[in-house]
Amino acid sequence: MKKLIFLFLLLFTFGCSQFNPYIDSRREAGVIGTIGPSTKDKVSICYNSLQAKPEQIISMAESECVKTGRTPEFYQQKYWDCSLFTPTRVEYLCRQTAKTGIDFSQ
């Protein structure tokens, strides 16, 4: 019974924050750049498909790619590649937006 109460308190303490999507851009102390799968050219997001909405994931990818003046393009999705509570990984490539040379503003 004590173990059950402890488990309940542990889950209650962490709440839903463990299910929030995050950008996997781990860093190592003293190392320049990331050691995780995210780079300036690729955004890797871990999420729980039961909790996160697609619009939220796309918005996260857009906010990362816009830092370098680019837009996200879906690359791949992997299951059971992140943590237990956010097992799905989706990756977007940051691409330059195509310029058509046609001015549609007139």
Image (spheres, helix red, strand yellow):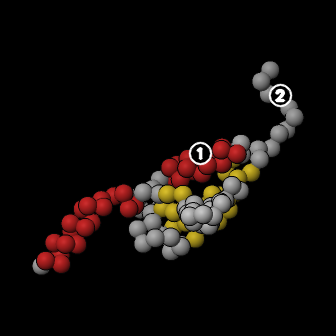
State the residue at coordinates (61%, 49%).
64
Task: Using residue 21 as the reference point, say whether residue 101 is left or right of it.
Answer: right
| Residue 91 in view | no
Give the residue at the far right of this rendering. Answer: 101
**Horizontal and vertical percent for residue 67?**
65, 44
**Badge 2 element:** loop
Residue corresponding to mark 1: 63
Name the foreground residue: 16 vs 102. Answer: 16
State the residue at coordinates (19%, 72%).
6
State the residue at coordinates (45%, 66%).
86
**Horizontal and vertical percent for residue 87?**
47, 70
| Amino acid type for the residue under numbered disc 1 | Ser
State the residue at coordinates (74%, 51%).
95
What number is the disc on residue 103? 2
Q: Which sits earlier in the primary sequence, circle 1 or circle 2?
A: 1
96 up-or-down from 9: above or below: above
The quarter of the displayed image where residue 90 is located? bottom right
**Horizontal and vertical percent for residue 60?**
55, 50
The quarter of the displayed image where residue 97 is located? top right
How many discs mark residues in the rendered view? 2
80 up-or-down from 86: above or below: below
Task: Using residue 37 as the reference point, say whether residue 97 is left or right of it.
Answer: right
